[in-house]
Image (cartoon, rainbow, N blue to C red):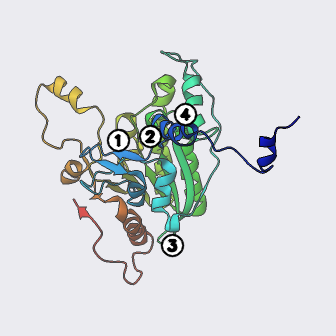
Amino acid sequence: MPSKLDDRVPASYKPAMNWLTNFVLPKIRAVVTKKAVPDNLWTKCPGCEQMLFYRELEANLHVCRNCGHHLRIGGEPRLKIIFDEGAFTRIELPKVIVDPLKFRDRRRYAERLREGQAVLGPGSDAVVVAHGEIGGFAVVAAAFEFEFMGGSMGLAVGEALLAAAKLAVLQEAALIVVPASGGARMQEGVLSLMQMPRTIIAADMVKEAGLPYIVLLTDPTTGGVSASFSMVGDITLAEPGAVIGFAGARVIEETIHEKLPEGFQRAEYLRDHGMVDLVVPRAELRTTLGRIIGLLREPHRPGAVGPLTGEIS
C-alpha cells in the first residue's frame, strides 16, 4: 500500500539532477572534447612565412598581403580571375589512352591518375580548357593544374592544347595558355616528349590564322613545358616571382661550377633579359590581357594606343 509520504508528493514532481551530472560533467566534456577546426582555415605564406587567414587570402586572389608573394592556384580559379565577370564555359577534352606504357615506379601510374582525378573530378588531367570573353573579345584559355601530378605534360595535355587551338581558330578567338608545370610526364616516356612538337604545332595553327597567341608564365614553368609552347607566344607575360627555366638552378650550378646571379630564373630576371615582355600582378591580369588583345585585334580602335600595365622589357 502507498505510504502517507507518497500522498504528500505531487504527481508532476521531478527530482533535481545530481550536481555532478548537472555542473561538473559538462565542464569535463568541454575540456576533453576538441572542436573540429577546418584544415584550410589558415595558410602559411611561402615567401614571408606569415600565417594568412584563408578567406582574406582568397579575397586577395591568393596573393600575400604582407610580402606580395603570389601563391599557386588551380586552373579553374585562374580562369575565374582572367575572364570577364569570372564567366566561362569549359569544354570536354579528347579521350586518350590511359597508362600506355603500363608504367610503375613505387606505385602504378594508373593509381596516380585515379588519385588526381579523385580531387579534380573524373577524367580530369593537368589542364583545363574553356572559352569566354576578356575585355569584350572572344578568348580560348588553357590553364594548367599544378596539383595534378605537378602539372606534368603527357598525352592528355598535348591533346587538350591541340583542342584549344582548334577551338580558337574555329571561333576566331585569341588563345591564352597559362602553364604551371614541372615538365614532361616521365610515366609516359617518349610519348610525353612527343607532346613538345605537337604543342608547337598547336601554337602555329593559331598564328597562321592571324589570331593572338598569348602565354602567361606562372610558378613554376620548367622542363619540357618551358622548352616548347611556353616560349613561342606573340606576347609573353609572367606573374611576379614565378620560377621559369628548363633545368633547376642547383643542377646548373653543379654543371658549370659557378654561382648563378641573384634572382636567376625568376620572372623579373627574364624580363630584364628580354625573355618576358611584362611582369603583371594577379590583380591586374584581366585588365592587361584585355588591353593587349584589343591592341592586337583592333589596333585602330579609338583609345587603343596607350601604355600597358606593368614594365615592358
Mark 3 or mark 2, which is nearer to you? 2
Whether 19 is drawn above or below 99: the answer is below
Q: How crowded is mark 1: few (under 14 residues within 10 Å), some or many (20 or more)?
A: many
Is there any visible trace of residue 66 in the rendered image? yes
Residue named by callout 2: 146
Q: Describe the element under mark 2 as helix, strand or loop.
A: loop
Query: At 37% from the left edge and 45% from the top edge, which residue is drawn?
Result: 43
Identify the residue at the far left of this view: 258
Q: Which image quarter is the C terminus in?
A: bottom left
The amino acid beneath tag 1 is: Pro
Give me the C-alpha separation between circle 4 and circle 3: 34 Å
Residue named by callout 4: 116
Which of disc 2 and disc 3 is earlier in sequence?
3
The amino acid beneath tag 3 is: Gly
The amino acid beneath tag 4 is: Gly
**Mark 2 near mark 1, Cβ–Cβ under 8 Å?**
yes
Q: How crowded is mark 4: few (under 14 residues within 10 Å), some or many (20 or more)?
A: some
Which of disc 1 and disc 3 is earlier in sequence?
3
Point out which mark residue 182 bears. none
Identify the residue at the far front of this view: 4
**Mark 1 near mark 4, Cβ–Cβ under 8 Å?**
no
Residue named by callout 3: 136
Mark 4 or mark 3, which is nearer to you? 4
Which of disc 1 and disc 2 is earlier in sequence?
2
> Residue 67 versus residue 74: which sits nearer the camera?
67
Whether 209 is drawn above or below 126: the answer is below
Whether 221 is drawn above or below 193: the answer is below
Residue named by callout 1: 220
Q: Describe the element under mark 1 as helix, strand or loop.
A: loop
Whether 47 is drawn above or below 255: the answer is below
Query: At 59% from the left edge and 35% from the top edge, which residue is drawn?
Result: 117
Give me the C-alpha separation between circle 2 and circle 1: 9 Å
